[in-house]
Amino acid sequence: MSNQLIEILTLENSHQYEKAYDSYVQLYSSDRSNYDAWKHFYFFLWIAYDEDITIPSRENLELPSFLPSMLKEGQQVFAEMADFNFIAGYTISIFPYLFGDYKEMEKIGNEMILKATKLDPENHIYRMAYLGSIENVDRTLYEQSVREAAPFVALTFTGSGILNEYFKDVLYRIDKLRKH
């Protein structure tokens, strides 16, 4: 991870979203093939669309068109990367309406999560997310995947920034199992 991206993630952690956004634009514009820059910038925009993240220049951003455009760029460059399929598939499956037709995009998001699982079948996080996306999944199978994924979630999402914070929170599901 580049020093510039580490600085941006520090800006995110300190809620300096305008500076983070400006820095992302600069970083991403300089190298659109940098997956880490794409991933964190894309996720930042995705979360900004729904969360209470104040980006004063956001009015000029036109997120409804910019986010799908970033997705398409990612699909052109990173389509065979498991992590890309997981991150993009997850975000699409949560808010499909941000990317186009709700039902079509929800299906595409779930297919991308499945593709991530096929590209990296040993990844417990992808498997858990995939099983969690299936209606009427065998509850025992899903709960086992939650237990298997927990230590990997804790190790994978330890860094700074909104993406790590979000996924650490939503994918560490072991406590949710105990409540049921």
Image (cartoon, helix red, strand yellow):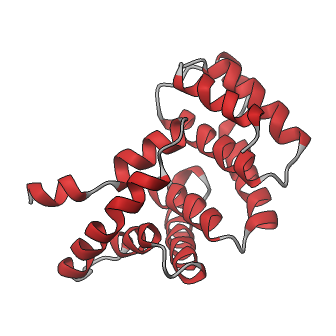
Viewport quadrant of the C terminus: bottom left
Residue 117 vs residue 18, the one in the foreground: 117
> Considering only vertical position in the picture, is 169 above or below 73?
above
Residue 101 visible in the picture: no
Q: Is residue 109 left or right of residue 42?
A: left
Percent x, y of residue 86: 55, 65
Q: Residue at x 57, y 58 (%)?
A: 87
The image quadrant that residue 12 belongs to is top right
Residue 119 visible in the picture: yes
The image quadrant that residue 81 belongs to is bottom right
Furthest-right residue in this view: 30
Q: Residue at x 41, y 61 (%)?
A: 152
> Considering only vertical position in the picture, is 161 above or below 43?
above
Q: Residue at x 71, y 34 (%)?
A: 62
The image quadrant that residue 48 belongs to is top right
Q: Residue at x 40, y 67 (%)?
A: 129
Viewport quadrant of the N terminus: top right
Percent x, y of residue 109: 54, 67
* Count of marks overlaid on the render: 0
Residue 161 vs residue 63, the one in the foreground: 161
Percent x, y of residue 25: 80, 33
Q: Is residue 40 left or right of residue 73?
A: left
> Considering only vertical position in the picture, is 85 above or below 71?
below
Residue 57 vs residue 17, the one in the foreground: 17
Q: Is residue 75 left or right of residue 104?
A: right
> Considering only vertical position in the picture, is 25 above or below 140?
above
Percent x, y of residue 138: 22, 83
